[in-house]
Amino acid sequence: MPDPMAGLPPRLLRTPEAARFLGISNRTLEKHRTYGTGPVYRKIGGRVVYAVEDLQSWSAIGARKSTSEQTAKRVFPARRLTAAERGAR
């Protein structure tokens, strides 16, 4: 069955919608944007928007099957990264 959304542009969400989608506060998402630790965003005119697929990709970075998983990547907190953390990205 063909995908009815095929060929359409990605759904774009403003900051409040994107934060709700991720289950975090607007302010936390804004901090992630400021520090460069968050999902990819787009600036259209004066508006910041996020593609749903970018939000899903960013949140998938932290996916793991167990707490002992050594190869899992990390979603960094919304703060400035140390030099060691920037190198670990």
Image (spheres, rainbow, N blue to C red):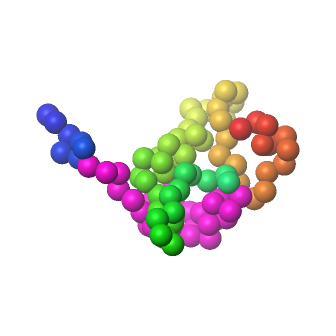
Q: Note whether 76 is above or below 30 in the view shown.
A: above
Q: Main secondary structure of the magenta part?
A: helix
Q: Residue 29 vs residue 85: left or right? A: left
Instruction: Identify the image quadrant of residue 85.
Output: top right
Looking at the image, is 22 positioned above or below residue 70? below
For this rendering, which residue is in front, 48 or 2?
Answer: 48
Q: Residue at x 56, y 52 (%)?
A: 39
Quadrant, the C terminus: top right
Does residue 34 belong to the magenta stretch?
yes
Against 28, residue 5 (above or below) is: above
- Percent from the top left, x then y, of residue 59? 54, 47
In the image, residue 50 lies at what x, y percent? 47, 58
Could you tell me which quadrant the N terminus lies in? Answer: top left
Residue appearing at x 55%, y 51% in the figure:
40
Residue 6: horizontal and vertical position, in percent? 24, 42
Which residue occupies 35% across, 51% down?
10
Q: Is residue 79 left or right of residue 12?
A: right
Q: Is residue 88 magenta?
A: no
Is residue 78 at all visible to an observer of this figure? no
The answer to whether residue 31 shows anywhere in this view is yes
Total numbered labels placed on residues in the image: 0
Give the extent of the magenta segment: 8-35
On the rendered structure, is 47 left or right of 89?
A: left
User: Which residue occupies 78% across, 56% down?
Assistant: 80
**Quadrant location of residue 74?**
top right
